[in-house]
Image (spheres, rainbow, N blue to C red):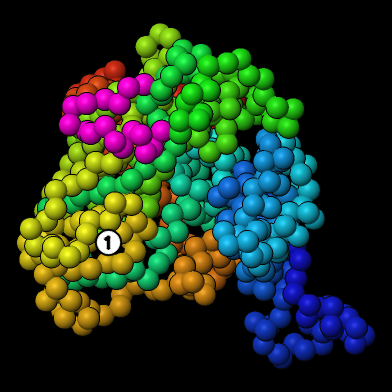
Amino acid sequence: MNHTNGGKQMEKKGITRRGFVTGTAGAALGALIVPREALGGPGYLAPSDKLNVAVVGCGGQGATDAAELVVGGENIVALADIDFEYVDRAVERRLRGRDGNPAPNFIKLKEAYAKAKRYADFRKMLDQQKDIDAVLVATPDHTHAVVAKAAMELGKHVYVEKPLTWSVQEARVLRETARRTKVVTQMGNQGHSSEDARLINEWIQAGIIGAVREVHVWTNRPIWPQGVPRPARSSAPPEPPGGGFGNDWSQRRLNREIAAAIVGDYSAPSTIDWDLYLGPAPEVPYHPIYHPFNWRGWLDWGTGALGDMAAHLIDHPYWALGLTYPTSIEATSTPWGVDENNKPVSFPLATKVVYQFPARPPQPPVTLTWYDGGLMPARPEVLPEDVPLQRGGGVIFVGEKGILMHETYGNNPRLFPASLMEAAQKVPKRYERVEADERNQPKHRMNWARAAKGQGKATTPFEYAGPLTETMLLGIVALRAGQGKRIYYDGETGRITNVPDANQYLHREYRKGWSL
C-alpha cells in the first residue's frame, strides 16, 4: 500500500515513523498515517492510504471508471483483459478526445496502465498479485458475478459496472457475499450519486406531486445490433417487423455493416483469448459481430437494452418510492433473433415490460412500465407543448397532484404543473451530497474508493444494487417466458410461482470449469 509523501519527508529529517509515533505519545494520532493492521485489522485502509486497484475489463467503460480513480489519487496496480490490443486502442482513442485535444484524465490513465502488471486471466491475477486492495469489474455482463465473487471472497473491495449481474440468481449471490465478507461494494450506476438524484428523492418523499401509483421509464437503446440471427444463418438483416412498432427505428438502430457481414467463418484474432471471454457462458464460436461492444445485444453475454440502461433509469423510482420486489411482470416485444434451431439468441429490437409493485404503507401500489427500442409512453396532458419527451430516455412519475419528469441518469428533474416548483424549493435537503467534478458529474467511483478507506458510505452498495438488478432482470425473465405471459414473483424465496418453467431463466448452468 502506497502512502502519501508525509512519511518520506519525516525520514529525510532523520526521524523514523516508529520513532515519531513513540516519541509523541501525547499528540493526536488521528493526524498520522498508521499501518492498517494497527487501526482496523486486515483489510483496513487508513483515509490517507492510496487504494491499490485491479481493473478487470480495461477498455471502454472500464477505462472511464479507472480514469476517475487515477485522477482521484488511487493506484492502478493490475489489469486483466482478454484483448489488450483493444484496450490500448480504446485508451488512445479516448486520449485524443472528441475534439482532438488530449483528455487530461486519460493522459494520467495511460501512464497508470503502463505501470500496471497485465494478465489475461483475472483468476491468475487474484492468485498471484498480493498487493491488490480492490477490484473494478467492467467486463461483459456474463462475467460480472464470477469476477466480483472471487474478489470478495479474498477480502477485496469491489466496484462492478451495471448491470450488477447477468442473472437474478447471481444478483442474490453477490448481495449475500457482500453481507458475509463485509467488503465495500458499489454498482456503476453513477447517476445515483448525483445532486439531481437527491432532489428527485426529496421532492417525491416530501409529497410534492402526491401519492405515486404510475411510473413510465424509457430509453432509446439499443444502439447495437439486436433482433439479428445467429451468424451463418442468414446473409442479410431481418425485415423490420410491423405490429405498430414502426419501421424506421430498426433502420436507425441496426449496424448494417456488421449485419451484412454476418455470414462467414471467422477465427478469433491472436490478440483475443476467446475461451476466457466466454467464461461461464456456453461455448460459441467467435464472430466479429459479438466483440467488442455488441455483446450487449446477445443473450449469451448481455442483457439487452433493459439490462444496459435500467440501472440508470429504474434506479430513481426504485429508490425514491422505496420499491421492493415486484409481484408480477409482463413483457411484450418485437421478435427475438434466433439460431438455426429457432432458439432465441439476440434480444428483440423493442420491448415493453410492465412491473407491478406492492403497496408500502402509507404509499400505494405502483405500476412501472418500461419501454425501449424507440417505444415511448403517451405524452402527459399536464406537460406544456414546448416541453419535449427526451427521445434519449427518461422517467415520468405520475402523482395525484402532478408529475415529476427527468432524463437519463436522473438528469434535469422538473415538476409539472410548474407551480409545484415553488413548494419544491422549500424542501429541505435530507440526503448527503456526493462530490462532483468540474463538469458537475458525481465522483461515483471515488465515492466507493473513499468508502473503502472509511470515509463515508458507498451510495449503491450491493445491499441496494442486488434487489434493483434482480428487479430489472425479471423483465428479461418475463420476455423469455413468452409474449404477454404474466409471471408472479415471490421475492422472499426468489421463485416464480405461477409459471414453473420460467424459473429456469432465473439462473444459468455454467460451462465446465466455471462456478460461482
2 is higher (above) or lower (below) than 219: below
Q: Which residue is mark 1?
A: 406
Tell me the quadrant of the picture where the C terminus can be found.
top right
Q: Nearer the viewer, residue 38 or 467?
A: 467
Q: Is residue 184 visible in the rendered structure shown here?
A: yes
Task: Residue at 18% x, 27% y: name it.
Answer: 243
Q: Main secondary structure of the magenta part?
A: loop
Rate crowding at label 1 as few (under 14), some (14 to 19) or many (20 or more) other CA atoms within 10 Å. Answer: many
Tell me, yes or no, whether the highlighted magenta stretch contains residue 250. yes
Q: Percent from the top left, x then y, of residue 80?
A: 69, 42
SS of the residue at dot 1? strand
Q: Is residue 130 visible in the rendered structure shown here?
A: no
- Report the number of numbered marks: 1
Tell me, yes or no, whether the highlighted magenta stretch contains residue 52. no
Q: Nearer the viewer, residue 47 or 75?
A: 75
Residue 499 relative to residue 27: left or right: left
Q: Percent from the top left, x then y, of residue 56?
A: 63, 44
Q: Amino acid at mark 1?
A: His
Q: Nearer the viewer, residue 144 or 99?
A: 99
The magenta region covers 238-254
193 is higher (above) or lower (below) than 375: below
Going by the picture, which residue comes out furthest to the right?
Answer: 14
Q: Percent from the top left, x then y, of residue 487?
A: 21, 29
Tell me the quadrant of the picture where the N terminus can be found.
bottom right
